[in-house]
Amino acid sequence: MADTSLVDRHEPFWKRLPVVVQLRRSTGWQRAMLITGVVICALYLIVAIAAPLIAPYGFGQLQGADGQGFPRTSAPSPEHIWGTTVGGFDVFSRVVFGARTAVLVVIVAVVVSIAVGVVLGMVSGYIGGWLDRILVVVADAIYAFPSLLLAIVVSIVISGGNSSYAGGIVAAAISITVVYVPQYFRVVRAEAVRLKNEAFVESARVMGTNPWRIMTRHVLRNSTRSLPLILTLNASDAILTLAGLGFLGFGIGPTSGAEWGYDLSRALADVASGVWWTGVFPGVAIVVLVLGVTFIGESLNDISDPRLRARRRLKQLVSRKQAASTEGAAA
């Protein structure tokens, strides 16, 4: 998260937005990575929103307006620019609609994970006692499970074989949420344990402030500074988890929605026949989106690192002294 102490409160509001602050503070490769990641994620978001306008066909459409069925495993052509699958689906349309599925699942999973993890971590760290011990044990137990295996189990329990679009999104989002809640819980709890003994919290407690108000007004505000970094890194991992669920057959059915992992699993049998387009395009879509989110996370991590900030300030100071000495020598 941006260092608010370095932000001028008198500047326009748009210059104090989180991403804008990081862009203004970043330099060199950090700025290039951040801009690249933001552009990639923005393009995917636009594609997800405008999917019905961009895709020439529906994700489950098997025939054109003339009533003739689409050819199966057809190579890229003017009618189907990325070809068709063995089931007769248009690859380009399914990749475009798959962006909507990925964005929806990641947004729901990350938002719910943060909401649950932050609340539990704040309550556990501030109140302590037996509640803290129980929540820590549960969080550690969940964290010890392999993430994909845990997501599969939760998805099976929630979906119950339901492959509808809404049901599949909810099942995938909740299964990913269960995986990431312990991470947010541990980070917020550690900060809450540290902050509850600070002077400003003790002062609020002595003045008789309600404990819930202390947690939300003082502890929460100061314990969530590192969450944006975790959010971006978990978002990229959530995309891969969703693709893994779909690849193993625990995602959304082909007639209910488009999902890249499922399309990749169906494309395995096509590789031996030389049909490359059914697997390449969904795979590239996953890789590029994960790369974009990772770029944002890594650049934010570099910008927030105090050691790197001190190093940049030292370089700026040295360069200024060198420039001043050069100007003095020239004079």
Image (spheres, rainbow, N blue to C red):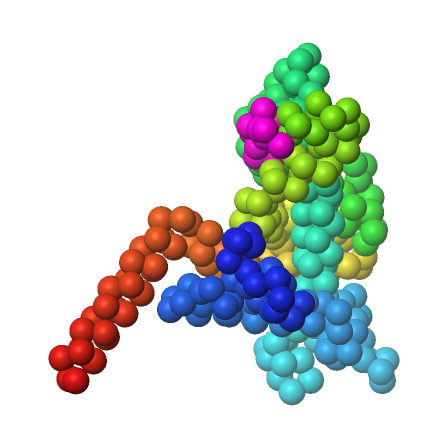
Residue 191 covered by magenta stretch: yes
Span of residues in magenta:
187-200
Q: What x and y, as percent, mark residue 329?
A: 13, 79
Q: What x and y, as percent, mark residue 225?
A: 57, 45
Q: Main secondary structure of the magenta part?
A: helix
The residue drawn where x is 40% and y is 67% is: 27
Nearest to the observer: residue 85 or residue 125:
125
Side of 192 where 172 appears, left or right: right
Q: Quadrant of the C terminus?
A: bottom left
Instruction: Specify whether residue 271 is in view.
Output: no
The residue drawn where x is 75% and y is 74% is: 50
Residue 244 covered by magenta stretch: no
187 is higher (above) or lower (below) than 292: above
Nearest to the observer: residue 184 or residue 241:
184
Side of 239 where 63 appears, left or right: right
Q: Which quadrant of the view contains residue 82? A: bottom right
Q: What x and y, as percent, mark residue 319?
A: 26, 69
Q: What x and y, as percent, mark residue 152?
A: 66, 37
Nearest to the observer: residue 274 or residue 185:
185
305 is higher (above) or lower (below) than 142: below
298 is higher (above) or lower (below) than 21: above
Count how many numbered circles sit on residues in the image. Answer: 0
Q: Which quadrant of the view contains residue 95? A: bottom right
The residue drawn where x is 70% and y is 17% is: 131
268 is higher (above) or lower (below) than 278: above
The residue drawn where x is 51% and y is 67% is: 23
